Image: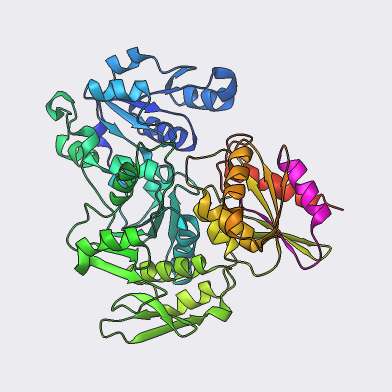
Amino acid sequence: MADTNFLVGLQLLVVGLGREGVALATYLAKQGLKVFATDLQPEEQLADVAASLREKGVTLHLGEHPISLLDKADILFVSPGVPLETPFLQQAMLRRIPLSTESRLFCHLCPAPIVAITGTSGKTTTTTLVAKIMEADGRRTWVGGNIGQPLIGVVDQIEPTDAVVMELSSFQLEYFHARLNKNVDMSKIPSPEPQQLARLLGNWSPPISAILNIKPNHLDRHPSMKHYIRAKRAIIDYQEAQGVMIMSLDNDMTRTIGNHFRKKVRWFSQEAQVANGAGLVGDMLALFDQKLEPQPLASQREIKLRGSHNINNILAACLLAREAGASPEAMRQVITSFTGVEHRLQLVREHHGVLYYNDSISTSPDRLIAALHSFNEPIVLLVGGRDKHLPWEEAAWLALVKTRDIIIFGEAAELIAEAIELVRPQIPSSNTAVHRCKDLEEAVSLAAQIARSGDVVLLSPGCASFDAFRNFAERGERFTELVRQLR
């Protein structure tokens, strides 16, 4: 059982009662610790959650974050959906109250080695691939972090011989940097085991980590690209000497970062063959040893996932799995049978000869670009949502080159339409028609009317979903529902 004695006697405040916050408050209360929690949502929106937590002894403050809560808090455990810039957290830092998270506490308590993955795109696919490879290799495997269940709830079931695979977002990784707690006076926190508490609040990186790629994203949440990169780097910056990091040699930013850690990096690349890395030998995906001898895994023809970006995800997953001790046989078994993750170039249906794909995970122009490169068929593209303050020129240009029809919907419709018309003079041969719809329902209906047999209807919004949906998954589920209703 995980040792939480270093938290005994402390007042633990959970900020945000999303998925992670609820799981963490539940776990801490079960340990007999003093837990209280706050969320901006009112009581009526959290009725079932609130009742369950109160039964476990958690004191709740709902509808606001009262500053007075900070008067008695020894540590704040912050949900990743709560921005650091919120006045409540800023006031906590001014008062030198330490901040942590569910994922950081789990990593501190977990008895098994952790394989962790971050990146602007490809995280969930790569994480899922690694987990399936470890399972195929006979290891009991736990998956969590930014996907699946919050792992804190099962930490007491994990054995040292198990495999733990985590997807970590930039919002989670912000708290792996000790800089947030640099002004904290540890002597004023009445922990019975101050060294353990200091470890929780200090710098830490998982022993086997990957940064798949870094591109502009989440600039509506991070103050600058510099801050975004710094958050991502927490996954590697504090590894111990025996740690290993997997990175893309083909991405400018990861290549620059990796060059600072040459001996610890295992590169994957579709453009070069690197010792101890992963890449291509002709059509074959392969792992390389120190002498560049290849270990063939599978040909690209055997891979069911669409898109060059997914070849990168597979190469990264195989490198991670190798470092975690998996066999090439397990890798081959998984990568030749894996058909993808929901909302990521997911084939929903073929209807009247038209293929409908759900790529609702596409919440940035870069992800839209990757999706467009995955098809050679004529495309009817559904794009739109809430803008994330990212450049649209390249995505707009490629959309005019690769699609026959573009259907724009949602809050960012005007911005996207302007970007398309701005670049259209560069492609005089493009006959792509642009249509405007008020919402996803109208967009799917129009797509079904104008698509022809042999076409692909692709939902790859390139925008956040929050103008109309709670998250990208709800948007993807609604698209899937609408497509399955077509007659």
Q: Is residue 304 left or right of residue 96?
A: right
Residue at the limit of the structure toward the left, as seen here? 187
Which of the 4 image quadrants contains residue 97? top left
Pinpoint residue 454: horizontal percent, then vertical percent: 77, 68
At x 14%, y 27%, the residue is 185
Q: Is residue 133 left or right of residue 258?
A: right
The answer to whether residue 12 is visible is yes
**Snapshot colouring:** rainbow
Taking depth in this image into account, of 165 and 400 the one nearest to the observer is: 400
Taking the magenta stretch, the answer to whether it contains residue 228 is no
Q: Is residue 460 left or right of residue 229?
A: right
Relative to residue 397, is residue 101 depicted above or below?
above
Relative to residue 128, is residue 334 depicted above or below?
below
Taking the magenta stretch, the answer to whether it contains residue 452 is yes
Pinpoint residue 262: horizontal percent, then vertical percent: 21, 67
- Magenta part of the chain: 439-460
Pinpoint residue 305: horizontal percent, then vertical percent: 57, 68
Taking depth in this image into account, of 235 and 280 the one nearest to the observer is: 280
At x 44%, y 28%, the residue is 16
Taking depth in this image into account, of 149 and 344 the one nearest to the observer is: 344
The answer to whether residue 1 is visible is no
Pinpoint residue 73: horizontal percent, then vertical percent: 29, 21
At x 83%, y 53%, the residue is 449
Taking depth in this image into account, of 53 and 376 the one nearest to the observer is: 376
Number of marks present in the image shown: 0
